[in-house]
Amino acid sequence: MNQPLRTLGVAPNAWGVNDAIADLTRPSLTPHPIALTTETKSLRLDLVKSAILIIDMQNDFCHPDGWLAHIGVDVTPARSPIASLTSLLPQLRDVNVPVIWVNWGNRPDLLNISAGLRHVYNPTGAGIGLGDPLPKNGAKVLTKDSWAAAIVDGLNHEPEDIYIDKYRMSGFWDTALDSILRNMGKTTLFFAGVNIDQCVMATLQDANFLGYDCVLLKDCAATTSPDYCFKATIYNVNQCFGFTSDSQLLIKAIKA
């Protein structure tokens, strides 16, 4: 008698199993192709194999009471992706593209953070650096599960979204991000968040090195750095690491 197979794993990296059989064929998912216009080429890509990574859209980088604002940085530019992401994310969720939030959230004990890394954020040792409480609200800077690491107000995040804590500028360094993406069969990644020239770029570069197809959404990313840093990032992505487009072109491609 043929016994039914039970699914073991996450599609498309899933087996069918019972007492006697392990089916390793991994049936493919139905493609959802779109044509997306970018600055350099028209891309044909499959939404079933795509995900969006939203980097560091969190209070410490985007809120006027967060850490960057505390040290004197104008965070107004870091808030600019909120409007574009608010329009884009429902469209992506409607076509089952995973929304992955990659926020800086260190261990409270900072055991995996070297002195050199801490120096970047507290060069004198006397300031408010990683893990230190902010004077205004006591939130510990860039600490997992604190207000500082939480997604900034104005961005709608859902329980079915995927949440990754990162500990370096790159979201791939010492995290589960690569394993999760590979289990889900994702090969094309859209990039958004802050700062475009630092954490977004570092994550995108690592994705490129790991073999992912990378599309940077310009209006969904921003920086508190000088404008030439934004322009240089766009240039380098187009030149070396992938493609650049924007949310409205992606929405248009989804609806076509």
Image (cartoon, helix red, strand yellow):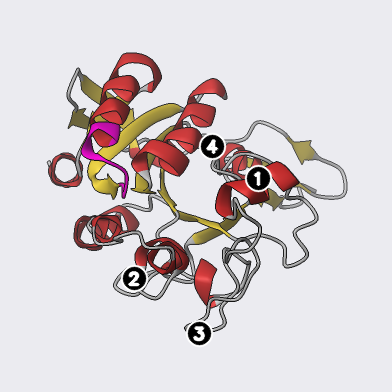
User: Which residue is located at x 34 percent, y 72 percent?
Assistant: 64
Q: How much space separates mark 3 and mark 4, taking CA atoms? A: 41 Å
Disc ID at residue 185:
4
Q: How many marks?
A: 4
Three-letter amino acid code at the position of disc 2: Asn
Q: How much space separates mark 1 and mark 4, taking CA atoms? A: 33 Å
Three-letter amino acid code at the position of disc 1: Leu
Magenta-span inclusion, residue 224: yes
Few, some or many residues within 10 Å of mark 1 (<14, 14–19, 20+): some
Q: Cβ–Cβ below 8 Å for labels 2 and 3?
A: no
User: Which residue is located at x 20 percent, y 56 percent?
Assistant: 84
Few, some or many residues within 10 Å of mark 3 (<14, 14–19, 20+): few
User: Which residue is located at x 57 percent, y 53 percent?
Assistant: 121
Q: Secondary structure at mark 2?
A: loop
Q: Which residue is mark 1?
A: 117
Work out whether residue 8 or residue 177 is closer to the camera in this orientation and state it. Answer: 177
Residue 42 shows in this picture: yes
Q: Is residue 197 above or below residue 156?
A: above
Q: Which residue is mark 3?
A: 137
Residue 238 is left or right of residue 49, and the answer is left
Residue 87 is left or right of residue 131, and the answer is left
Q: How much space separates mark 1 and mark 2, taking CA atoms? A: 31 Å
Q: How much space separates mark 2 and mark 3, taking CA atoms? A: 23 Å
Disc ID at residue 156:
2
